[in-house]
Image (cartoon, rainbow, N blue to C red):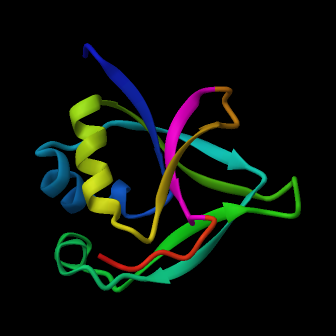
């Protein structure tokens, strides 16, 4: 795969139906984790995202005050175009940053923005 990037998912981007709708294919991932983060739930109001995931509440992560906290998920190798498709799926409730995972791999991940955003 040329022009590849790493994407870490701890939520609905792991769902086969979301992958097919967003990327047109199923992704192959490996287990990994984000250290020093914690997970909550956020209510999703975007109709397209609700249609793809089938779920009204999605997980969202943010930095934790406890450096021992950990959020498990899957690490995927995707194309830059697929990363743009993931950006469209994740809507304004999330912001994308690059983090270093437990494995040492640098990957893009969607997390809670520092400032509240309006839902698209």
* Along the viewing direction, whichever of 119 and 70 lies nearer the viewer: 119
State the residue at coordinates (23%, 60%): 18
Number of numbered tags placed on the structure image: 0
Q: Quadrant of residue 49?
A: bottom left
Q: Quadrant of the N terminus?
A: top left
State the residue at coordinates (47%, 75%): 117
Please, is residue 120 above or below residue 72 in the view?
A: below
| Range drawn in magenta | 105-113
Residue 24 lies left or right of residue 8; in this view the side is: left
Q: Quadrant of residue 24?
A: top left
Image location of residue 2, percent across then percent down: 26, 13
Q: Which secondary structure class fits the magenta region best? A: strand
Image location of residue 75, percent across then percent down: 48, 38
- Any magenta on residue 5? no
Residue 17 lies left or right of residue 75; in this view the side is: left
* Along the viewing direction, whichever of 9 and 5 lies nearer the viewer: 5
State the residue at coordinates (28%, 30%): 80
Image location of residue 100, percent across then percent down: 66, 34
Q: Quadrant of the C terminus?
A: bottom left
Please, is residue 119 above or below residue 64 in the view?
A: below
* Along the viewing direction, whichever of 9 and 116 lies nearer the viewer: 116
- Residue lying at the far top in this picture: please name it: 2
């Amino acid at each position: 795969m040329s022009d590849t990037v790493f994407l870490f998912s701890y939520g609905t981007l792991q769902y086969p139906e979301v992958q097919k709708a967003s990327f047109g294919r199923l992704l192959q991932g490996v287990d990994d984790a984000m250290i020093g983060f914690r997970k909550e739930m956020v209510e999703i109001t975007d109709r397209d995202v609700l249609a793809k995931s089938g779920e009204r509440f999605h997980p969202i992560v943010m930095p934790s005050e406890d450096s021992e906290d950990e959020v498990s998920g899957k690490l995927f190798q995707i194309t830059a175009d697929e990363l743009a498709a993931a950006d469209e799926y994740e809507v304004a409730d999330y912001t994308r940053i690059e983090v270093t995972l437990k494995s040492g791999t640098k990957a893009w991940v969607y997390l809670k923005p520092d400032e509240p955003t309006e839902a698209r």
